[in-house]
Structures are given as structure tokens and as C-alpha cells.
Image (cartoon, rainbow, N blue to C red):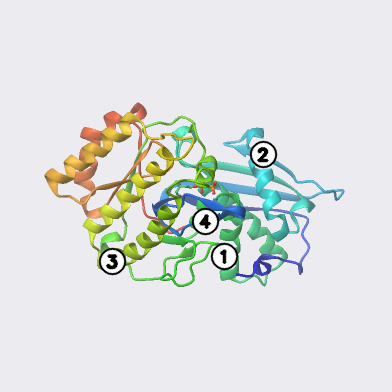
Amino acid sequence: MDLSRFSSNIYLNTINKGSVSWSSPSNIALVKYWGKKQTQIPENPSISFTLDNCKTITVLDFVKKETQDDVFSFEVFLDEIPKPEFHPKIETFFNRIEAYLPFLKQFHFTIKTKNTFPHSSGIASSASGMSALALCLVSIEKQLNPNLSETEFIQKASFLARLGSGSACRSLEGDLVVWGTHPEIEGSNDLFGVKYPYKVHDNFKNYQDTILLVDKGEKQVSSTVGHNLMYGHPFASQRFGQAVDNISKIKLILESGDLEAFIALVESEALTLHAMMMTSMPYFILMKPNTLQIINRIWSFREETKLPISFTLDAGANVHVLYPEQYTDDILKFIQDELVAYCQNGHYICDKIGFGAKQL
Ligand code: DP6
């Protein structure tokens, strides 16, 4: 795909200051992105459920600099507290996206952000945070160039979000988003996420995701480092091929509503992700003993009750418990009776499939 479609040279309007605001959710991958090429191009396609309750709300104030210079000028606040430690990540993001947003160095930005989930919950806030910021920036571009169509808007925001954090490009829309080229998914591409374009069985409408917070601490190995360890990984090419096959399989599953096949695919994806971590060099383990306790409890409960409960994991110790909405009462009772004991301070978050970002 031609990158020049994301460049903007002509702005019709001039503005001196303003404020834009978006809320953007997190997402949980069913088929995982793990391994990337240069410039945030994924090694394999991935698909995720967009979440509903776990989101970032960002207000971006901008004012034209009095003297134009060649530096990015911004400050960041989380919950109204200045966060200089976020600066390097945003500086990197701005450097990556400057070619596509020529106004970036003309303004001073105040980024005011907050998450609906606790900051220290171990839930990745990069997907929701980077997508919210990308959407705010494209909203400014839209003020400069009102001709930007709705499709161009969302594709560009996803394209930019990807340059901030790969999985962030899957957070803008819902309820299922594909990122990465796959021959059987029309429109899928490596540059931005696309709404899953095919029929989805009612079994997957309003799917629930209860996130069990096993370990709220900082991860010992960041996703970026983990992705890089897929270079030269002994199982890399098999893994990337498997993800392609799993997207083909999940397409059939999503259409047929086959919950048993869904469970097998999603759990296998989660464990494969962690198997890649355990077999990279250096190797590492992000699961904790309680992660395994929870997984075993889920398996026994499923065996006993035949309820279609499953789990997935992201790059951490927390467990996402997935189930169709109609089983919520039974499964929440099970979580409260048997799984909460394995959560740090008994904390968990009830979430479900959502429909993407909203301008505020
Ligand atoms: C395990 O999107 O956080 O959650 O592109 O380096 O920012 P960067 O990585 P990131 O990786 C997410 C990995 C994952 C799987 C997934 O969401 O697909």
C-alpha cells in the first residue's frame, strides 16, 4: 500500500489553538500479534475483541508556538499529575508520525489523560492510550483539512496509532478488528486495523471478558523487547504460519458459532504466545503461579459444568476470562467463589466486547 495516502501537504484552514478529546478502549487479541518487522509492521495477522469498559480518555489542548522551531513541545498529565516519565515514549511516537502530520512542530501540546482502569492494574494502557492520542491528533488535522472523509479519518488514526503501539491500531472500532494482511480477509493490511468484515454468529455478540488481576506490578519484560526476541527465534516461522492458519479457522468459527472450536483456538493462541516467550533467548516467563492456578480451575469448572468458559492472556500474568453473555450469572459466581482468591487484593474487572473509540 502506498504510504503517501497518509501524508498531508495542503491545509485549507489555519488555527491558532483549540482542544480535542477522545475516549478509546483497550482490546484483547484472540489471535496474537507477537513479532514485528521495521516500522511496526506485524509478522503475522491478528484479530481482537474491542473492549468496552477499559479505556483511556485523552484531552489534547494545542496552541501555536510563538516562535517556530524544530522541536516537539508537549507536556503530559495522567490524572492531572505531570508525567515526565512518559515523555520518551511520546517523543518516539511523534518522531515516527511527524512525516504524516506536518503541523506537529508548530504547536505546543498539553496531553491530559486518564484511564478507567487502575493505572497499576498491569493492564496494558498503550493500546487505549496511543489510539486516543492518535485520534486527537487526526481531529486536529480534520480542523485544518475539513475534506478528510470519515474513512480516511479512521484509517489514518489507526495507521498513526500503530506507529505508537502495534495493538493500538485495533482499538478504534469494534467489535472485532483485524490487523495484518490475510488472504481471506478483504481489506486486511499491515498498516492499519480494519473492522472484521464478515458475518458473526450471535454467540459472539456481547461476549464477556472478566479480567482477573493476578499481578499488578510492572512487567519484567516489555512487549517491545518480547517482539524483538522473535528475531532468530527457533520457532518463529512456524508460529507466524500458525497465526495465518488460525485466522482462517477463526473466520469459520465466528460464522458458525462453534464455541468448542473457539475455546480451543483462543486458549491455544494464549499458551503459544507464552510458549514463544519461554523458548526465546533470553527466555522469560510472564505467567505467575496464580495464572496457572486459574487456568486449571477454569479447565475443571468447564469439565464439570460444560459451560463455554475460556481464557486468554496478553503479555502478562493477568487472565482474561471469556464467555457468552447468557452464562454471566453462573460464571461470575464461579469467579467470585473460586478465582478471586488468586487475584491480587481480590481485584478483577468486568468488561465485554465494545464498539470502539468515541469523540467527546
Ligand atoms: C501480547 O502492541 O504492546 O498483547 O507494538 O511493541 O507496542 P508494541 O507491542 P504491543 O504488543 C501486544 C502484544 C500482545 C498481543 C496482541 O495484542 O496482539
List the single residue furthest toward the right: 67
Q: As shown in the figure, which amino acid type bears the numbered disc 4?
A: Pro
Q: Which residue is mark 3?
A: 201
Q: Residues within 10 Å of mark 2 (few under 14, many from 20)?
A: few
Q: Which residue is mark 2?
A: 88
Q: Residue at x 40, y 38 (%)?
A: 278
The residue mark sitting in front, 3 or 2, is 2
Q: Tell me if residue 49 can be seen.
A: no
Which quadrant of the figure has residue 114? top right
Q: As shown in the figure, which amino acid type bears the numbered disc 3?
A: His
**Residue 107 shown left or right of residue 267 in the figure:** right
Q: Which residue is mark 1?
A: 155
Work out whether mark 1 precedes mark 2 in sequence or the reverse, and give the earlier one: 2
**Residue 19 shown left or right of residue 222 in the figure:** right
Q: Which residue is mark 4?
A: 42
Q: Between marks 2 and 4, how big is the CA–CA gap?
A: 23 Å
Tags 1 and 2 touching, CB below 8 Å = no
